């Protein structure tokens, strides 16, 4: 006995939610609601014509209501009674069934989130959040509700030009690339017939050349910076961060997000996971005796929390980007040195003054150094040599400060740079 079909109601259609797989809700007479994993609700009619089973799309709910869908079904049945294929009576501009469904149900935002979700497993947490933030802030307000198949180059251009107009040229370029990847995914998935963003290449102004991070590389000038940091009277967390930055020469973002779980004080080692590194490769920072002493002091203050250098407003968050920057401004080093500048200081002095091997230095800076066969070294490469080098660096900074002649002038002993 055929299974009895219980007709749909507006309430049941409205309450239908997406599941892990697409599914159908039957209404009768071949009409059913097709619910997609992305939340689309599409009306379809299953029928037979000339002995072949066929499918006809009536559009998406709620634009097409239950009563509208039933009227379309009844119209189709009348056509069939006259031996006319209902698909043949669609007016000019009819697309394929799949394209109709996509245009009705898949907006740019829906496709973008689908693309984002498929890539999330291969992205770092930070990159995943950054992409979504760009979309929500600059793209979805302009393109989000537009069917992906209706997106035109002019739509994309208007979106990215608006970003460019506020002076964020680099962000505009990166956003255009994101939109192009989304449209490329839509094209490959047959959601649309064109990658509209690909046609906007070259429409934006060139990204201005980046300004090098200010850095002090002259030992005679470095003396005064080190002394200034030691006497910094602002936040103790910021002062510790400034000193630790000078001892480790890590990138500011790696410094700010340093966690106690990554620190092995007994082994004098900081293990930075790959997702926090620019090159997406785990990195080891050997800790000098001076760095260990600093961490033991700091542990008494922030050790109960997650971050070495927590935010002043919330210990559950890391130190803000402006934390050490504002401190350097307060110390009158705004245009002379930066947090990132310690890397140039570290590289220059270790190479030109202390005579350390350049490849050891580059390894410690977590740069992409390769062996003679072109293979990337792992994080433990030259670790004993790097540990010795980091101690030499810390000892040099201590020794440099002791050479200052406290006469209130630029006085530095003549051997300060030796």
Image (spheres, rainbow, N blue to C red):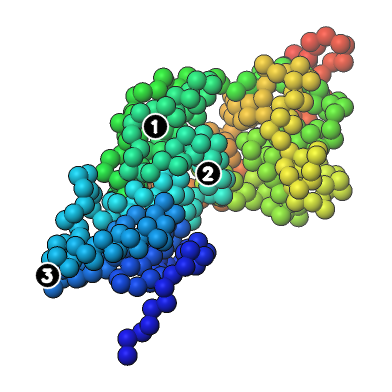
Residue 225 horizontal/vertical position (percent) = 76, 21
Labels 3 & 2 near each other (Cβ < 8 A): no
Residue 23 horizontal/vertical position (percent) = 40, 69
Question: In the image shown, does 218 or 158 lie closer to the viewer?
Answer: 158
Quarter of the picture containing the N terminus is bottom left
Q: What is the secondary structure assignment of the residue under circle 2? A: helix
Mark nearest the camera among 3 and 1 is 3
| Vertical arrangement, residue 219 with respect to residue 395, above or below | above
Residue 156, labelled with which disc? 1
Residue located beneath label 3 in the image = 50
Q: Which residue in the rendered view is the most extreme toward the bottom?
A: 1
User: What residue do we see at 67% from left, 17% from top?
Assistant: 336
Say whether residue 6 is visible.
yes
User: What residue do we see at 26% from left, 61% from top?
Assistant: 75
Q: Dot 3: few (<14), some (14–19), or many (≥20) neighbours within 10 Å?
A: few
Mark nearest the camera among 1 and 2 is 1
Residue 103 horizontal/vertical position (percent) = 34, 48
Labels 3 & 1 near each other (Cβ < 8 A): no
Residue located beneath label 2 in the image = 132
User: What residue do we see at 30% from left, 72% from top?
Assistant: 29
């Amino acid at each position: 006995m055929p299974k009895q079909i219980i007709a749909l109601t507006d309430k049941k259609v409205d309450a239908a939610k997406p599941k892990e797989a697409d599914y159908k809700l039957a209404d009768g007479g071949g009409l059913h609601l097709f619910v997609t994993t992305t939340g689309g609700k599409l009306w379809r009619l299953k029928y037979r014509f000339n002995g072949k089973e066929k499918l006809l799309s009536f559009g998406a709910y709620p634009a097409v209501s239950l009563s509208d869908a039933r009227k379309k079904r009844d119209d189709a049945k009348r056509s069939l009674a006259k031996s006319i294929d209902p698909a043949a009576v669609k007016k000019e501009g009819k697309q394929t069934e799949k394209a109709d469904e996509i245009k009705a149900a898949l907006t740019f935002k829906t496709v973008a989130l689908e693309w984002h979700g498929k890539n999330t497993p291969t992205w770092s947490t930070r990159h995943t959040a950054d992409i979504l933030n760009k979309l929500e802030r600059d793209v979805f307000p302009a393109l989000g509700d537009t069917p992906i198949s209706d997106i035109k180059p002019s739509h994309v251009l208007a979106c990215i030009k608006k970003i460019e107009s506020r002076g964020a040229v680099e962000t505009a370029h990166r956003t255009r690339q994101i939109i192009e990847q989304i449209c490329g995914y839509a094209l490959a998935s047959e959601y649309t017939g064109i990658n509209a963003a690909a046609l906007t290449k070259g429409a934006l102004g060139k990204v201005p050349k980046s300004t090098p991070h200010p850095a002090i590389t002259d030992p005679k000038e470095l003396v005064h910076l080190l002394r200034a940091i030691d006497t910094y009277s602002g936040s103790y967390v910021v002062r510790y961060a400034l000193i630790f930055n000078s001892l480790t020469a890590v990138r500011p973002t790696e410094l700010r997000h340093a966690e106690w779980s990554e620190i092995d004080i007994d082994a004098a080692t900081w293990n930075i996971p790959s997702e926090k590194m620019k090159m997406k490769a785990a990195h080891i920072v050997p800790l000098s005796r001076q760095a260990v002493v600093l961490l033991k002091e700091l542990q008494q203050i922030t050790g109960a929390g997650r971050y070495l250098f927590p935010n002043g407003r919330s210990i559950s968050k890391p130190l803000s980007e402006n934390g050490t920057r504002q401190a350097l401004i307060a110390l009158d080093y705004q245009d002379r040195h930066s947090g990132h500048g310690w890397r140039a200081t570290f590289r220059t002095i270790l190479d030109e003054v202390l005579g350390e091997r350049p490849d050891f230095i580059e390894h410690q800076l977590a740069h992409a150094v390769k062996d003679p066969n072109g293979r990337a070294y792992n994080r433990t490469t030259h670790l004993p040599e790097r540990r010795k080098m980091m101690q030499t660096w810390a000892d040099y900074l201590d020794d440099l400060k002791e050479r200052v002649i406290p006469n209130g002038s630029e006085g530095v002993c003549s051997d300060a740079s030796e």
